[in-house]
Amino acid sequence: MEPSLTNNQKIVLQALENSEQPLGAYSILFNIEKKGIKSPQQVYRALDKLIEIGAVHKIESLNSYIACKHKDCKARESTSFLICQVCQKVYEVLESDLSDKFIKLSQESNFKYSTHNLEIFGICDLCN
Amino acid sequence: MEPSLTNNQKIVLQALENSEQPLGAYSILFNIEKKGIKSPQQVYRALDKLIEIGAVHKIESLNSYIACKHKDCKARESTSFLICQVCQKVYEVLESDLSDKFIKLSQESNFKYSTHNLEIFGICDLCN
DNA sequence: ATATGTTACGTTATAATATAACATAACAAA
DNA sequence: TTTGTTATGTTATATTATAACGTAACATAT
């Protein structure tokens, strides 16, 4: 069943959904101060939960966060993104054979694959 | 020709080379204070340069840094790692066909590939 | 209904990571 | 020997993230 979000979690999620670009935690905070969110903790706690349920992903190389556009996202742990260096938009890639590829790649080093994070940088369709 | 390193750069690089695990910038600083390095700036500046020439890579999801073991590393920009969740060691993957794979993957979204960062988490041979 | 456990919340403080800004030094090339 | 470039040292500050504490809300089991 669907996990029901708390008020703070909804507010943080909406802030991310309304943004074209990934947002940093403090940028989120600034956006939602008018809604009564006053401290980084509240944002980070909401983010933690949202990430846990797959509703939000973190872009590690940007220290920022995006709302996941996929209903019931599988990517709780493994994530793959295309990041446009012009407009900063992030597109999530859902390719099941990517994990397969990485599992094989790992095996070649006798490494037991668990999860991955892939960030591809370049120029998106719209900016090209 | 080989880029000759400055004293500070050598000190920072050695600290990373002497470590089995990736080190954060402040951890590096702590390690080399006895050698006269006194401020984060000095560490970050050295890191910037070392990364630029490919002698050091940043592990984004750990906010930390490793010395590259490959002579004249091609991975100035694109990097791929296996990160052991048990011993924290990082193994760099050099698979030329990875970039090809990512280029193709990008093309499917009309995205023009430029660089990538891949971080695979799991358990390494030694810890398995 | 009430005790108990769990999860969320609010708040203050602080840790950890990274950069800005400014003055100076070292050094190569014109 | 001036000029440009790169590196340095230093102080201050920005940015990102967590610790720690007390309280509130709420479910559920007695």
Image (spheres, coloured by chain):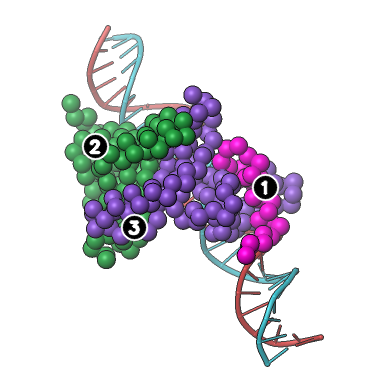
Chain colours: A purple, B green, C red, D cyan
Query: Of the residues shown, which amino acid type is indicated by label 2?
Result: Cys
Distance in Å between CA atoms under marks 3 and 2? 25 Å
x and y percentages locating residue A42 in the rendered image: 64, 56
Q: Which mark is residue A14?
A: 1
Picture coordinates of residue D14 (x, y %)? 56, 39
What is the secondary structure assignment of the residue under circle 3? strand
Question: Which element carries disc 2, helix, strand or loop?
Answer: loop
Q: Residue A13 lies in magenta, yes or no?
A: yes
| Place of residue A50 in the rendered image (x, y in percent of width and height, measured from the top left) | 59, 56
Q: Which residues are magenta?
A: A1-29
Look at mark 2 in the image and give the residue it sits on: B73
| Mark 2 neighbour density, 10 Å: few (under 14) some (14–19) many (20 or more) | some
The quadrant the C terminus of chain B occupies is bottom left
Q: Are marks 3 and 2 on the same chain?
A: no
Question: Tags 1 and 3 in contact by the CB under 8 Å rule?
Answer: no
Q: SS class of the residue under badge 1? A: helix
Whether residue B12 is visible: yes
Q: Give amino acid for label 1.
A: Gln
Foreground residue among B34 and B61: B61
D19 and A78: which one is in front? A78
For the residues labelled 1 and 3, the Cα–Cα distance comes to 33 Å
Q: Does A70 sit left or right of A10 as displayed?
A: left
- Badge 1 and badge 3 in a common chain: yes
